Image (spheres, helix red, strand yellow):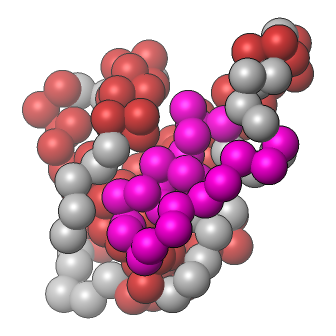
Amino acid sequence: MQCLPDKIKFPYAAFLIKQHIPEFLFTAYLTCLQHYLDFCHAHSLHAGLRSTLLPFLSSLKNVTDEETKQARHTITLLYELVNSLKSDISQNPREISSIPKNHPGPTAPDKTAIWQHEFHGLHLFW
């Protein structure tokens, strides 16, 4: 399991604060997010698409109902973060203009590089 890139970890942690998630739960949320990204990478799924939630949850083994709920909440918060960023970008389109349209992806199958490319500044899915 790779470490979450700072470009993902810090905005997500800030969003957890904004959502009033207790700080003692941050490690669990970030670990779950890491597992989700690993799952998406292993199954060639585009991280952040809502269609990946159910397959991810179905892949969880030996977890309690409470842990499954928390995993669902972790990924749902990711979707909310992405949607809020999309809204911010649509209101301030100049912020994304510095990212070239033909921004090259990673050249090797390095998971960290792939996540950094997918989450480039957390400007996902547009």
Count how many numbered circles sit on residues in the image. Answer: 0
Q: Quadrant of the N terminus?
A: bottom left
Viewer-proximal residue among 88 and 22:
88
Taking depth in this image into account, of 61 and 113 the one nearest to the observer is: 113
Going by the image, does 84 lie left or right of 33? right
Indicate whether 62 appears above or below 95: below
Name, please, the residue furthest toward the left.
24
Residue in the picture at 66% in, 54% down: 104
Between residue 29 and residue 37, name the one nearer to us: 37
Residue 96 lies left or right of residue 80; in this view the side is right
The quarter of the rendered structure image containing the C terminus is: top right
Is residue 83 toward the left or the right of residue 54 in the image?
Answer: right
Would residue 75 be found to the left or right of residue 110 on screen? right
- The answer to whether residue 121 is magenta is yes
Q: Residue at x 35, y 58 (%)?
A: 112
In magenta, the rendered stretch is 101-123
Horizontal and vertical percent position of residue 41: 46, 76
Within the magenta stretch, is there residue 30?
A: no
Residue 14 in picture, x, y percent from top left: 38, 21
